[in-house]
Amino acid sequence: MEFTAAAIAGFLNGEVEGDPGIRVNTIAKIEEGSEGALSFLANPKYEHYIYDTKSSIVLVNRSFAATGKISATLIRVENSYEAFASLLRLVDQARPRKKGVHPSAVIEPSARIGNDIYIGPYAYVGENVVIGDGSSIYPHVYIGDNTTVGKNCTMYSGVKIYHECIIGENCTIHAGSVIGSDGFGFAPQSDSEFMKIPQLGNVILEDMVEIGSNVSIDRATMGSTIIRRGVKIDNLVQIGHNVEVGENTVMAGQTGIAGSTKIGRNCMFAGQVGIAGHLKIADGTKIGAQGGIPGDIREENSVVLGSPAIDVRQFLKSSVVFKKLPELKSKVESLEKQLEEIRKNLG
Protein backbone atom coordinates (compact mmCIF):
# COMPACT_ATOMS: atom_id res chain seq x y z
CA MET A 1 0.00 0.00 0.00
CA GLU A 2 1.14 3.52 -0.74
CA PHE A 3 0.02 6.80 0.86
CA THR A 4 0.86 10.46 0.34
CA ALA A 5 1.75 12.80 3.18
CA ALA A 6 -1.48 14.69 2.52
CA ALA A 7 -3.57 11.52 2.84
CA ILE A 8 -1.84 10.52 6.07
CA ALA A 9 -2.26 14.01 7.52
CA GLY A 10 -5.95 13.92 6.61
CA PHE A 11 -6.41 10.59 8.40
CA LEU A 12 -4.57 11.84 11.50
CA ASN A 13 -5.87 15.44 11.51
CA GLY A 14 -2.27 16.54 11.16
CA GLU A 15 -0.44 19.36 9.39
CA VAL A 16 2.08 18.73 6.61
CA GLU A 17 5.39 20.56 6.79
CA GLY A 18 7.17 19.86 3.49
CA ASP A 19 6.00 18.03 0.37
CA PRO A 20 2.32 16.97 0.70
CA GLY A 21 2.66 14.74 -2.38
CA ILE A 22 5.56 12.64 -1.17
CA ARG A 23 4.66 8.95 -0.93
CA VAL A 24 5.51 6.17 1.52
CA ASN A 25 4.98 2.44 1.22
CA THR A 26 6.67 1.06 4.33
CA ILE A 27 7.26 1.81 8.02
CA ALA A 28 10.66 2.05 9.74
CA LYS A 29 12.35 3.16 12.94
CA ILE A 30 13.62 6.72 12.60
CA GLU A 31 17.24 5.54 12.94
CA GLU A 32 16.74 2.87 10.26
CA GLY A 33 14.70 4.91 7.78
CA SER A 34 15.00 4.72 4.00
CA GLU A 35 13.38 6.42 1.04
CA GLY A 36 9.66 5.65 0.96
CA ALA A 37 9.50 4.94 4.71
CA LEU A 38 7.33 6.52 7.39
CA SER A 39 8.80 7.03 10.89
CA PHE A 40 7.83 8.85 14.05
CA LEU A 41 9.58 10.84 16.79
CA ALA A 42 8.13 10.82 20.29
CA ASN A 43 11.01 10.29 22.72
CA PRO A 44 13.41 13.30 22.91
CA LYS A 45 16.32 10.82 23.27
CA TYR A 46 15.91 10.04 19.57
CA GLU A 47 15.67 13.62 18.32
CA HIS A 48 19.20 13.60 16.87
CA TYR A 49 18.11 10.96 14.34
CA ILE A 50 15.57 13.27 12.71
CA TYR A 51 18.30 15.49 11.26
CA ASP A 52 19.85 12.72 9.16
CA THR A 53 17.08 10.12 8.83
CA LYS A 54 16.49 8.79 5.32
CA SER A 55 12.76 8.33 5.98
CA SER A 56 10.51 10.28 3.61
CA ILE A 57 7.94 11.25 6.25
CA VAL A 58 8.27 11.63 10.03
CA LEU A 59 5.38 12.10 12.47
CA VAL A 60 6.20 14.63 15.21
CA ASN A 61 4.32 16.33 18.01
CA ARG A 62 2.91 19.76 17.24
CA SER A 63 5.17 21.16 19.95
CA PHE A 64 8.37 19.81 18.34
CA ALA A 65 10.90 22.59 17.65
CA ALA A 66 13.73 21.66 15.29
CA THR A 67 17.26 22.80 16.07
CA GLY A 68 18.70 21.86 12.68
CA LYS A 69 17.87 21.19 9.05
CA ILE A 70 15.45 18.31 8.35
CA SER A 71 15.17 16.80 4.88
CA ALA A 72 12.12 14.60 5.63
CA THR A 73 8.56 15.87 5.28
CA LEU A 74 7.03 16.31 8.74
CA ILE A 75 3.44 15.69 9.79
CA ARG A 76 2.63 17.49 13.02
CA VAL A 77 0.02 15.81 15.24
CA GLU A 78 -1.10 16.08 18.86
CA ASN A 79 0.59 12.86 19.91
CA SER A 80 2.99 11.24 17.43
CA TYR A 81 3.14 7.90 19.26
CA GLU A 82 -0.66 7.52 19.29
CA ALA A 83 -0.85 8.67 15.68
CA PHE A 84 1.75 6.11 14.62
CA ALA A 85 -0.18 3.39 16.47
CA SER A 86 -3.33 4.40 14.57
CA LEU A 87 -1.50 4.01 11.27
CA LEU A 88 -0.16 0.60 12.30
CA ARG A 89 -3.74 -0.50 13.06
CA LEU A 90 -4.83 0.74 9.65
CA VAL A 91 -2.08 -1.24 7.91
CA ASP A 92 -2.84 -4.33 9.98
CA GLN A 93 -6.55 -4.17 9.16
CA ALA A 94 -5.71 -3.88 5.46
CA ARG A 95 -3.90 -7.22 5.44
CA PRO A 96 -5.82 -10.07 3.79
CA ARG A 97 -7.65 -12.19 6.36
CA LYS A 98 -7.89 -15.96 6.34
CA LYS A 99 -11.42 -17.31 6.03
CA GLY A 100 -13.18 -20.65 5.99
CA VAL A 101 -12.89 -23.91 7.88
CA HIS A 102 -9.98 -26.22 7.11
CA PRO A 103 -10.99 -29.85 6.38
CA SER A 104 -8.78 -31.18 9.16
CA ALA A 105 -10.47 -29.06 11.85
CA VAL A 106 -12.77 -31.02 14.20
CA ILE A 107 -16.01 -29.26 15.08
CA GLU A 108 -18.51 -31.13 17.23
CA PRO A 109 -22.05 -31.23 15.76
CA SER A 110 -23.57 -29.29 18.65
CA ALA A 111 -21.18 -26.33 18.22
CA ARG A 112 -22.56 -23.11 16.73
CA ILE A 113 -20.18 -21.30 14.41
CA GLY A 114 -20.78 -17.72 13.27
CA ASN A 115 -20.33 -16.10 9.88
CA ASP A 116 -17.14 -14.83 8.26
CA ILE A 117 -14.86 -16.96 10.44
CA TYR A 118 -11.58 -18.83 10.06
CA ILE A 119 -10.83 -22.18 11.70
CA GLY A 120 -7.39 -23.52 10.83
CA PRO A 121 -5.89 -27.01 10.47
CA TYR A 122 -6.25 -29.42 13.40
CA ALA A 123 -8.22 -27.02 15.56
CA TYR A 124 -10.79 -28.59 17.87
CA VAL A 125 -14.14 -27.02 18.77
CA GLY A 126 -16.00 -28.89 21.52
CA GLU A 127 -19.62 -29.70 22.33
CA ASN A 128 -22.01 -26.73 22.61
CA VAL A 129 -19.28 -24.21 21.88
CA VAL A 130 -20.43 -20.87 20.45
CA ILE A 131 -18.03 -18.87 18.23
CA GLY A 132 -19.12 -15.38 17.20
CA ASP A 133 -19.01 -13.78 13.77
CA GLY A 134 -15.65 -12.67 12.42
CA SER A 135 -13.49 -14.72 14.78
CA SER A 136 -10.25 -16.44 13.76
CA ILE A 137 -9.17 -19.75 15.26
CA TYR A 138 -5.63 -20.63 14.14
CA PRO A 139 -4.16 -24.16 13.81
CA HIS A 140 -3.99 -26.48 16.83
CA VAL A 141 -6.30 -24.36 18.98
CA TYR A 142 -8.42 -26.30 21.49
CA ILE A 143 -11.77 -24.91 22.65
CA GLY A 144 -13.41 -27.02 25.35
CA ASP A 145 -17.07 -27.93 25.76
CA ASN A 146 -19.67 -25.25 26.57
CA THR A 147 -17.26 -22.38 25.96
CA THR A 148 -18.50 -19.14 24.40
CA VAL A 149 -16.28 -16.99 22.17
CA GLY A 150 -17.57 -13.55 21.17
CA LYS A 151 -17.39 -11.73 17.86
CA ASN A 152 -14.12 -10.71 16.19
CA CYS A 153 -11.82 -12.69 18.49
CA THR A 154 -8.44 -14.07 17.44
CA MET A 155 -6.81 -17.14 18.95
CA TYR A 156 -3.35 -17.94 17.66
CA SER A 157 -1.79 -21.35 17.25
CA GLY A 158 -1.70 -23.59 20.30
CA VAL A 159 -4.15 -21.65 22.47
CA LYS A 160 -6.06 -23.92 24.86
CA ILE A 161 -9.38 -22.83 26.33
CA TYR A 162 -10.86 -25.27 28.82
CA HIS A 163 -14.54 -26.07 29.22
CA GLU A 164 -17.23 -23.53 30.17
CA CYS A 165 -15.10 -20.42 29.83
CA ILE A 166 -16.50 -17.17 28.42
CA ILE A 167 -14.50 -15.01 26.01
CA GLY A 168 -15.93 -11.58 25.19
CA GLU A 169 -15.82 -9.66 21.91
CA ASN A 170 -12.69 -8.33 20.19
CA CYS A 171 -10.34 -10.39 22.35
CA THR A 172 -6.91 -11.61 21.23
CA ILE A 173 -5.09 -14.58 22.77
CA HIS A 174 -1.56 -15.26 21.56
CA ALA A 175 0.16 -18.57 20.93
CA GLY A 176 0.51 -21.12 23.68
CA SER A 177 -1.69 -19.48 26.29
CA VAL A 178 -3.99 -21.56 28.48
CA ILE A 179 -7.31 -20.20 29.71
CA GLY A 180 -9.20 -22.14 32.37
CA SER A 181 -6.65 -24.66 33.61
CA ASP A 182 -7.20 -25.86 37.17
CA GLY A 183 -6.42 -23.47 40.00
CA PHE A 184 -3.71 -24.57 42.42
CA GLY A 185 -6.05 -26.03 45.02
CA PHE A 186 -4.81 -28.79 47.33
CA ALA A 187 -5.85 -29.51 50.91
CA PRO A 188 -3.16 -30.88 53.28
CA GLN A 189 -4.02 -34.22 54.90
CA SER A 190 -2.94 -35.70 58.21
CA ASP A 191 -0.58 -38.12 56.44
CA SER A 192 1.34 -35.18 54.89
CA GLU A 193 -0.23 -35.81 51.51
CA PHE A 194 -2.37 -33.32 49.60
CA MET A 195 -5.90 -33.86 48.38
CA LYS A 196 -6.85 -32.09 45.17
CA ILE A 197 -9.75 -29.67 45.48
CA PRO A 198 -11.93 -29.82 42.35
CA GLN A 199 -11.94 -26.52 40.46
CA LEU A 200 -15.56 -26.14 39.39
CA GLY A 201 -15.62 -22.50 38.27
CA ASN A 202 -14.52 -20.90 35.01
CA VAL A 203 -12.65 -17.95 33.49
CA ILE A 204 -14.37 -14.90 32.03
CA LEU A 205 -12.54 -12.54 29.69
CA GLU A 206 -14.61 -9.43 29.04
CA ASP A 207 -14.43 -7.43 25.78
CA MET A 208 -11.23 -5.95 24.34
CA VAL A 209 -8.87 -8.12 26.40
CA GLU A 210 -5.48 -9.06 24.93
CA ILE A 211 -3.48 -11.95 26.34
CA GLY A 212 0.19 -12.47 25.39
CA SER A 213 1.85 -15.78 24.59
CA ASN A 214 2.34 -18.57 27.15
CA VAL A 215 0.05 -16.99 29.73
CA SER A 216 -1.86 -19.18 32.19
CA ILE A 217 -5.14 -18.03 33.72
CA ASP A 218 -6.58 -20.52 36.20
CA ARG A 219 -10.26 -21.30 36.49
CA ALA A 220 -11.99 -20.51 39.78
CA THR A 221 -12.59 -23.07 42.49
CA MET A 222 -16.17 -21.77 42.55
CA GLY A 223 -17.52 -18.80 40.62
CA SER A 224 -15.23 -17.13 38.10
CA THR A 225 -11.73 -15.80 37.56
CA ILE A 226 -12.53 -12.50 35.84
CA ILE A 227 -10.42 -10.39 33.51
CA ARG A 228 -12.34 -7.15 33.00
CA ARG A 229 -12.77 -5.12 29.84
CA GLY A 230 -9.68 -3.66 28.19
CA VAL A 231 -7.07 -5.53 30.26
CA LYS A 232 -3.73 -6.13 28.48
CA ILE A 233 -1.51 -8.96 29.71
CA ASP A 234 2.06 -9.54 28.50
CA ASN A 235 3.76 -12.89 27.86
CA LEU A 236 4.51 -15.44 30.60
CA VAL A 237 2.05 -14.13 33.17
CA GLN A 238 0.37 -16.42 35.75
CA ILE A 239 -3.04 -15.48 37.18
CA GLY A 240 -4.38 -17.70 39.95
CA HIS A 241 -7.88 -18.97 40.64
CA ASN A 242 -10.66 -16.54 41.61
CA VAL A 243 -8.52 -13.50 40.81
CA GLU A 244 -10.33 -10.44 39.48
CA VAL A 245 -8.43 -7.92 37.34
CA GLY A 246 -10.07 -4.51 36.91
CA GLU A 247 -10.74 -2.65 33.67
CA ASN A 248 -7.84 -1.35 31.58
CA THR A 249 -5.16 -2.76 33.86
CA VAL A 250 -1.86 -3.72 32.16
CA MET A 251 0.73 -6.29 33.28
CA ALA A 252 4.24 -6.82 31.91
CA GLY A 253 5.94 -10.20 31.49
CA GLN A 254 6.46 -12.76 34.26
CA THR A 255 4.03 -11.13 36.64
CA GLY A 256 2.33 -13.56 39.03
CA ILE A 257 -0.97 -13.01 40.85
CA ALA A 258 -1.89 -15.49 43.57
CA GLY A 259 -5.42 -16.75 44.09
CA SER A 260 -8.43 -14.66 45.15
CA THR A 261 -6.64 -11.31 44.84
CA LYS A 262 -8.71 -8.39 43.55
CA ILE A 263 -6.86 -5.95 41.27
CA GLY A 264 -8.37 -2.51 40.71
CA ARG A 265 -8.95 -0.56 37.52
CA ASN A 266 -6.24 1.23 35.53
CA CYS A 267 -3.34 -0.42 37.35
CA MET A 268 0.12 -0.85 35.81
CA PHE A 269 2.46 -3.68 36.80
CA ALA A 270 6.03 -3.83 35.49
CA GLY A 271 7.90 -7.09 34.82
CA GLN A 272 8.19 -9.85 37.44
CA VAL A 273 5.76 -8.30 39.90
CA GLY A 274 4.55 -10.83 42.47
CA ILE A 275 1.31 -10.38 44.41
CA ALA A 276 0.31 -12.63 47.30
CA GLY A 277 -3.15 -14.19 47.57
CA HIS A 278 -6.39 -12.77 48.99
CA LEU A 279 -5.25 -9.14 48.66
CA LYS A 280 -6.92 -5.98 47.41
CA ILE A 281 -5.01 -3.64 45.12
CA ALA A 282 -6.55 -0.17 44.74
CA ASP A 283 -7.44 1.48 41.44
CA GLY A 284 -4.57 3.17 39.62
CA THR A 285 -1.79 1.36 41.50
CA LYS A 286 1.61 1.28 39.79
CA ILE A 287 4.14 -1.38 40.83
CA GLY A 288 7.77 -1.25 39.66
CA ALA A 289 9.71 -4.19 38.25
CA GLN A 290 10.18 -7.15 40.63
CA GLY A 291 7.87 -5.52 43.15
CA GLY A 292 6.73 -7.94 45.86
CA ILE A 293 3.30 -7.23 47.36
CA PRO A 294 2.61 -9.10 50.64
CA GLY A 295 -0.35 -6.97 51.81
CA ASP A 296 -3.25 -4.83 50.60
CA ILE A 297 -2.67 -1.55 48.79
CA ARG A 298 -5.63 0.57 49.83
CA GLU A 299 -4.67 4.05 48.61
CA GLU A 300 -5.64 4.75 45.00
CA ASN A 301 -2.91 5.75 42.52
CA SER A 302 -0.13 4.47 44.78
CA VAL A 303 3.31 4.01 43.23
CA VAL A 304 5.45 1.36 44.93
CA LEU A 305 8.84 -0.29 44.38
CA GLY A 306 10.89 -3.02 46.01
CA SER A 307 10.24 -6.34 47.69
CA PRO A 308 8.44 -6.03 49.97
CA ALA A 309 7.23 -2.98 48.05
CA ILE A 310 7.12 0.45 49.68
CA ASP A 311 6.15 3.91 48.51
CA VAL A 312 8.38 5.04 45.65
CA ARG A 313 9.61 8.11 47.53
CA GLN A 314 10.64 6.02 50.53
CA PHE A 315 12.28 3.50 48.23
CA LEU A 316 14.39 6.14 46.50
CA LYS A 317 15.51 7.57 49.86
CA SER A 318 16.31 4.08 51.11
CA SER A 319 18.29 3.24 47.98
CA VAL A 320 20.73 6.01 48.88
CA VAL A 321 21.28 4.29 52.22
CA PHE A 322 21.62 0.85 50.61
CA LYS A 323 24.59 2.07 48.57
CA LYS A 324 26.31 3.34 51.71
CA LEU A 325 25.83 0.20 53.82
CA PRO A 326 29.44 -1.06 53.41
CA GLU A 327 30.76 2.38 54.41
CA LEU A 328 28.35 2.59 57.35
CA LYS A 329 29.33 -0.91 58.45
CA SER A 330 33.00 0.09 58.51
CA LYS A 331 32.17 3.18 60.56
CA VAL A 332 30.16 1.16 63.07
CA GLU A 333 32.98 -1.36 63.46
CA SER A 334 35.46 1.48 63.95
CA LEU A 335 33.25 3.09 66.59
CA GLU A 336 32.86 -0.24 68.39
CA LYS A 337 36.64 -0.61 68.59
CA GLN A 338 37.00 2.95 69.94
CA LEU A 339 34.32 2.28 72.56
CA GLU A 340 36.04 -0.91 73.57
CA GLU A 341 39.35 0.97 74.05
CA ILE A 342 37.61 3.65 76.11
CA ARG A 343 36.09 0.94 78.35
CA LYS A 344 39.53 -0.63 78.86
CA ASN A 345 41.11 2.72 79.75
CA LEU A 346 38.30 3.59 82.16
CA GLY A 347 38.58 0.16 83.75
Image: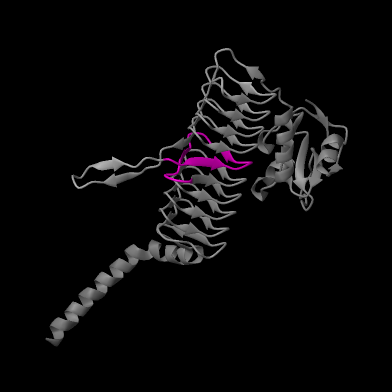
- Report the front residue among 153 and 315: 153
Name the chief secondary structure element in magenta.
Answer: loop
- Report the front residue among 42 and 126: 126
- Report the front residue among 76 and 219: 219
Q: Position of residue 237 (x, y in %)?
A: 47, 41
Q: Quadrant of the N terminus?
A: top right
The reply to whether residue 224 is visible in this rendering is: yes
Residue 116 lies in the magenta stretch:
no
249 to 1, vertically: above or below: below
Residue sitting at 85 percent across and 42 percent down? Answer: 16
Residue 202 lies in the magenta stretch:
yes
* Residue farthest along the left direction in this orientation: 347
300 to 214, vertically: above or below: below
Residue interval drawn in magenta: 200-223
Residue sitting at 58 percent across and 12 percent down? Answer: 103
Q: Quadrant of the C terminus?
A: bottom left
* Residue farthest along the top direction in this orientation: 103
